[in-house]
Amino acid sequence: MRKNYIKDHTPVLISVLLISLFLSIPAFAQGDMFISNAKVIITGTGERIENGSILIRNGKIEAIGKNLQAPEGVRIIDASGQWVMPGIIDQHSHMAMGTVNEATTPNSSGTDASDVIKNDAPHIYNALAGGVTTIHQLHGSANPIGGRDEVLKLKWGRSQEEMMIEGNQEGLKFALGENPLRVYSGDPNFRNRTRMDIEFQLRRYFAEAMEYKRSWDEYELKKKGKIKPANEYEKKNGPVPPKRDIRKETVLGVIEGRIRSHIHAYSNSEIAMFDRLAREFGFKPTSYEHVLEGYQVADELAATGSVASIFADNWNYKVEAEKAIPFNGALLHERGVVVSVNSDSDERIRRLNLDAAKLIRYGNMPETEAVRTITWNAAYGVWLQDRIGSLEVGKDGDIAIFDEDPLSVYSKCIKTIIEGEIFFDRENALTTEKWIKGETGKKKIT
């Protein structure tokens, strides 16, 4: 009788057993994590914590230091013998974009990088494998005024909306010198035949934006009755609003400080030119990009407070790059300039940690400051230093874990974590074979 009962109810008993087994497996809340026993934690603030731990709750760092205990129900990552640092930030990237340049007009400020995000780009995974958690996605350098930017968390496999940082203040790309000249010099429909003309065009666009503001200010005053109607039609029907112009609105946002400005500039004369232009219209450039001759105007850059987003050691690949030197970053830092190291490359992005190390080799930059060039300084360059770029309580749990000192050529990224979730794990890494099969470990790529 008992045997028959067991036999007849075997499927039910197996189901109960499986359910019990499933329920016994701990379910970890998304964004909760405890990283324990790290050999060294490089906080990105200049502090190093040996044998430290980090607690992340709801994607934010809740505690960091020594002698921390993991609370119940939190995923534990044993980082024994490993180095933990803030997730690496690339301040200048064109990665994961369907289109980089709108090379049909010298002013393409109506375009937006967020419209062409390719969340399935394989370069995202390669960047994660190098410890990169965030990129500053920029329009290209074809135009004196390019398009609006986007800042992305590299949440591989997630939607475009999930990758974009909510509340991030947008920025606008500018480009000086050789690139826009090369694009438009032979086009009879546009000017930009010389560097002088690029400055003229920029001043014209800024002046038009200010005139656009005046027209809207006048309209608002007319609505309030503080300015008399201009004609009989306005007396009868009320004031007519100006025609909306998105490009002028965007440029005006830069002048008023609501939109960041990122200026592609190589030569010292053009850096000085844009700085004068910015002072004329009353705004501060957020960052100069590449800045290969920045060491020649270091004091001027320090006075503006702008970030110098540089290459570590790229030079001699075009005329403007002839005077570049690998000591540029260290010299700028010594004069008080905030320096970040960028990749501008889908391939070079995966080894930004080694590019940062080159600033120690060329100029003896302190190790803590070299780390900041790919963490806090880069975050400052996109006005997100209060959220990312260092390991501090209240900031996002964006972390890269290396098997050795991240500034060592022998180091490898073991795990890359964004807001308390693992997006790259070397033990379960996506190989070429798995890529062809459409697999990453045990998870199907969709």
Image: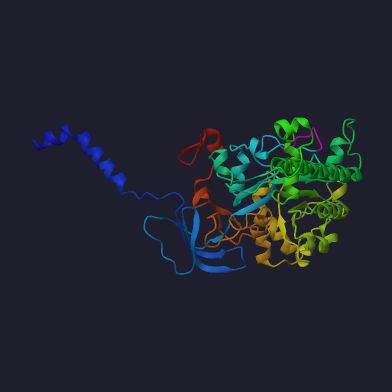
* Residue 355: quadrant of the picture: bottom right
Left or right of 121, for residue 34: left
The residue segment tinted magenta is 100-106
Counting labels gives: 0
| Residue at the image point whose x is 52% and y is 60% from the top | 394
Give the quarter of the figure containing the N terminus: top left
Q: Position of residue 330 (x, y in %)?
A: 76, 63
* Residue 366: quadrant of the picture: bottom right
Q: Is residue 125 above or below residue 387?
A: above
Left or right of 36, for residue 278: right
| Residue at the image point whose x is 49% and y is 50% from the top | 421
Q: Position of residue 210 (x, y in %)?
A: 79, 45
Q: Position of residue 56 (x, y in %)?
A: 47, 57
Q: Is residue 369 above or below residue 11?
A: below
| Residue at the image point whose x is 67% and y is 55% from the top | 378
Residue 101 is inside the magenta segment: yes
Q: Position of residue 83 (x, y in %)?
A: 55, 61
**Colour treatment of the image:** rainbow
* Residue 272: quadrant of the picture: bottom right
User: Is any atom of residue 211 visible in this view?
Assistant: yes
Residue 388 is inside the magenta segment: no
Q: Residue furthest left?
A: 1
The front one of 136 and 107 is: 107
User: Magenta residues: mostly which secondary structure?
Assistant: loop
The front one of 201 and 113 is: 201
